[in-house]
Amino acid sequence: MAPYSTSKLLIPLVAFGLILAPGRSASARDRADWLKDARYGIMVHFLPAGPEWEKAVDDFDVAAFADDAKAAGAKYVLFTLGQNSGYYCSPNVTYERLAGYREHERCSRRDLPMELADALSKRGIRLMLYLPSRSPQQDRKAMAGLSDVGEWEPAPQEFTRKWSEVIREWSLRYGRKASGWWFDGAYNTRGWDDVSQPQSWRTWAAAARAGNPESILAFNPGLNWRRGQPRARETVAFRRLSDEQDYTAGEQENWGATPKADPAPEGVQWHGFSYLGSNWGQADGPKLSDKKMVAYVRKVNAEGGAVTIDVGLGRHVDDAGKRHVICRNHLAQLNALAGATGER
């Protein structure tokens, strides 16, 4: 996915990484039933970094954002914990210890996702969490401390062990307040595919479900192209990278993929994911008319899929004096979508 690239109380057997293969697909589908029923949700790239990063976290208007999500008809919000810069909007002592930083040097004092989870829950909206599959690729100190290498190389065993410890702390912190995870940048799966190794998809998934066994998981392979190479079909994001995966990552650059045209593997919930603006996290556009966006979401929903819509941020006050966090143009299209689909 473009935003990831460097230009962007578990069952004991599972907790210890033992394989419970029979029925795994059925349980995955059961876990993700709510996503199909949700029909659509929104995602925001909130990625402060640098000297003013913690002020940006402290200034985020949770109530206004939750009101915007409600007005948009969203049944869930996918929110970034952090990405490649190595700054995070949530406390995590495990991360800072392993990455070689002092407490709150890279992880905020304010627990923004916790406040969001509570505010969204009051409005009937679920919270999901976004995190890359690898260490922050722009922070060489953190990469070294976490024993990681470049994101296109197989993940070392020691990295997966450490990264799973980091994920486990966040999972236990949020518990059932987090309904799922979307892991970006799983470009090279060879470091996780061999489940006979101490560290694999099993380790990772157990960590992500440590606080909520019902958490749904998606692992994103991106569009499966490198800079300077021809782009492959976008349907790579509708594969299942692991039998721990509950729903498709669904990344696409244009609103076009559908459950019938690009079907999900058996036992996996179909989910598509793209942006309203010109790119991930951008506040321009929207690139489709209201009519076309409504038609697309309706088509996907009718075929049994769910859609996550990436929107831009832009704090403003409307004519009635109400505060908003989602940019005006995107909020207007989301309001139109909510009205047309009966989600308001």
Image (tube, helix red, strand yellow):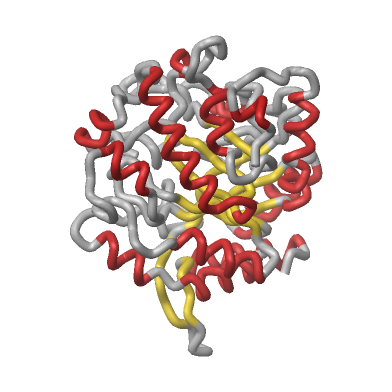
Q: Quadrant of the C terminus?
A: bottom right
Above or below: residue 60 compared with residue 238: below
Which is nearer the eye, 252 or 18? 18
Which is nearer the eye, 70 or 139? 139
- Percent x, y of residue 221: 49, 26
Q: Quadrant of the N terminus?
A: top left
Q: Is residue 14 visible?
A: yes
- Percent x, y of residue 149: 29, 22
Q: Residue at x 22, y 63 (%)?
A: 52
Q: Residue at x 73, y 40 (%)?
A: 32
Q: Is residue 276 visible?
A: no
Residue 222 falls left or right of residue 209: left
- Percent x, y of residue 118: 58, 66
Res 166 quadrant in image: top left
Above or below: residue 36 compared with residue 230: below
Give the tally of numbered discs.
0
Q: Residue at x 75, y 50 (%)?
A: 298
Residue 340 falls left or right of residue 163: right
Q: Residue at x 55, y 38 (%)?
A: 208
As drawn, the residue found furthest toward the front would be 12
- Percent x, y of residue 44: 47, 55
Which is nearer the eye, 118 or 199? 199
Residue 189 falls left or right of residue 7: right
Which is nearer the eye, 318 or 241? 241
Res 339 quadrant in image: bottom right
As drawn, the residue found furthest toward the bottom would be 320
Residue 77 falls left or right of residue 39: left
